[in-house]
């Protein structure tokens, strides 16, 4: 149980979007209410009995809360996009901004892959747009919108025509 708890804590500590949504107090996710409606802020019980059904249920409940909460109105992705936009729209770009943007970009890549975009598709779209001599970026806000539209999560229907050469 302890390794699962510690891994979850480490994941949330390294996720700046989750930190923005839920703060830095990881244990707060495991607070419960007693019969009088008062919050119990004691989380040490989770690690007392590592194989405990109760500990496992508490962690499952916290994970289910996180998944449900992040998917309401696409909260996680929208927060991630907003954090990226804030950095990109700055007039001056500091070293800290570069590091933060790099971390947020990794989170975005993970999110795109988890939602069904292949690494090959992401790579080809970015290469086509940003590593060709044809495309010039003139307005950052327009470019941000263009980028989000490349990965809009909309389903598309395609017609495929397969040309065959008749062998004689």
Image (cartoon, helix red, strand yellow):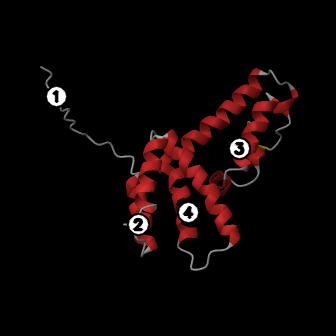
The residue wearing badge 2 is 133
Lower position in the chain sequence, tag 1 or tag 4: 4
Cα gap from disc 3 to disc 4, whole angstroms: 19 Å
Task: Classify mark 2: residues with Cα within 10 Å, few (<14), some (14-19) or many (20+).
Answer: few
Q: Residue at x 40, y 71 (%)?
A: 136
Task: Classify mark 3: residues with Cα within 10 Å, few (<14), some (14-19) or many (20+).
Answer: few
Q: Quadrant of residue 44?
A: top right
Q: Residue at x 13, y 24 (%)?
A: 166
Cα gap from disc 2 to disc 4, whole angstroms: 25 Å
Q: Residue at x 54, y 69 (%)?
A: 88
| Quadrant (top left/top right/bottom left/bottom right) for the N terminus | top right
Cα gap from disc 1 to disc 2, whole angstroms: 36 Å
On screen, 100 above or below 49? below
Marks 1 and 2 in Cβ contact (< 8 Å): no
Cα gap from disc 1 to disc 4, whole angstroms: 49 Å
Cα gap from disc 2 to disc 3, whole angstroms: 38 Å
Lower position in the chain sequence, tag 3 or tag 4: 3
The residue wearing badge 1 is 165
The residue wearing badge 4 is 84
Q: Kindly state the secondary structure of the residue where label 3 is placed.
A: helix
Left or right placement of residue 104 versus residue 148 in this view:
right
Lower position in the chain sequence, tag 2 or tag 3: 3
The residue wearing badge 3 is 11
On screen, 96 above or below 27? below
Q: Which mark is residue 4?
A: none
User: Considering depth in this image, is 153 or 53 the residue closer to the camera?
Assistant: 153
Mark toward the viewer: 1 or 2: 1
State the image coordinates of residue 75 (x, y, percent, origin top left).
Answer: 52, 51
């Amino acid at each position: 149980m302890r390794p699962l708890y510690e891994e979850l804590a480490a994941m949330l500590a390294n996720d700046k979007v989750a930190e923005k949504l839920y703060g830095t107090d990881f244990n707060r996710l495991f607070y419960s209410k007693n019969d009088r409606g008062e919050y119990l802020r004691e989380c040490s019980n989770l690690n007392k009995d590592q194989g405990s059904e109760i500990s496992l249920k508490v962690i499952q409940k916290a994970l289910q809360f996180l998944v449900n909460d992040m998917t309401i109105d696409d909260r996680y992705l929208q927060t991630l996009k907003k954090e990226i936009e804030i950095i990109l729209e700055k007039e001056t770009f500091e070293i800290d901004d570069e590091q933060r943007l790099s971390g947020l970009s990794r989170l975005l890549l993970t999110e795109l892959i988890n939602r069904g975009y292949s690494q090959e598709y992401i790579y080809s779209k970015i290469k086509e747009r940003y590593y060709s001599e044809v495309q010039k970026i003139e307005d950052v806000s327009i470019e941000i919108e263009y980028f989000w539209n490349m990965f809009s999560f909309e389903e598309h229907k395609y017609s495929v025509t397969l040309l065959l050469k008749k062998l004689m």
